[in-house]
Amino acid sequence: MSRILLIEDHEQLARLVSKGLAGAGIVADEVTTNDSAWAALRQVDYHCLILDRGLPDGDGLNLLRHIRQGGLTVPCLILTARDALHDRVEGLEAGGDDYLPKPFAMAELVARVRALLRRPAITKSLRPCYQDLMLFPEGGAMQCGERSITLAAAEMQIMLALVNRQGEVVRRSAMEAVAWGLSDAVTPNALDVALPRIRRKLQSVGSRLQIINVRGQGYALL
């Protein structure tokens, strides 16, 4: 299931957009400011952004420019009431991939998001690997040598976070965010329940790697 970041300070509109996307199998984490969006982007590898311009802490394009300057190429749909030609040009030049003015039809929004999600398909189909492990996100499997095992959706997201960091520490909050999202109700011990399951699965496929708890910092795959 695709996960996107919805940056919109209008609470009712954000709920409607999230509901419309959910009906298309797309999960949206909702934030309301540039600062909260940047914090979310540092924790989760989103497949797409939906960005409003008129946010409480400034123009959303400032965030978009910051994202692009940092080398993040996640597709971005700018969703705003500013529909003048110069506004659209400014949005696209700031790094936007598409521009949809308010008001809009939900069917068109969903179609445009789906179109953006199709763009990085080649990148997403790559098999993340680290030492003796290979992950198959689309099939929900983890493989070591000739052995493979199925991972639940949250387990796969946790393993992707660890494998992508190649032995570096991943913060606990970041692992919870990628596994269950920022908008979902997560029990405080959800990660503590998931990690022993993943460790047993690593052993069952014969991997030499272990998930290590780095006290006060997070977890690493070593």
Image (cartoon, rainbow, N blue to C red):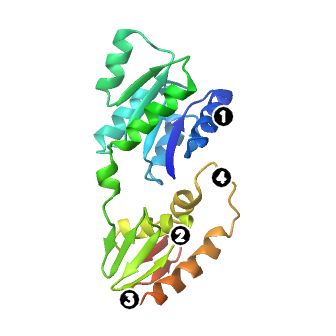
Residue 155: image tag: 2
Q: Is residue 10 above or below residue 162?
A: above
Q: Is residue 139 above or below residue 193?
A: above
Mark 4 lies on residue? 184
Q: Quadrant of residue 68?
A: top left
For label 3, the SS is: loop
User: Which residue lies at the image location 30% right of the left edge and 53% below the top edge?
Assistant: 123
Label 4 and label 3: CA atoms lie apart by 33 Å
Q: Residues within 10 Å of mark 3 (few under 14, many from 20)?
A: few
Label 1 and label 4: CA atoms lie apart by 13 Å
Res 168 visible = no
**Closest to the observer: 68 or 121?**
121
Amino acid type shown at disc 4 = Asp
Label 1 and label 2: CA atoms lie apart by 27 Å
Amino acid type shown at disc 3 = Arg
Res 131 visible = yes
Mark 3 lies on residue? 208
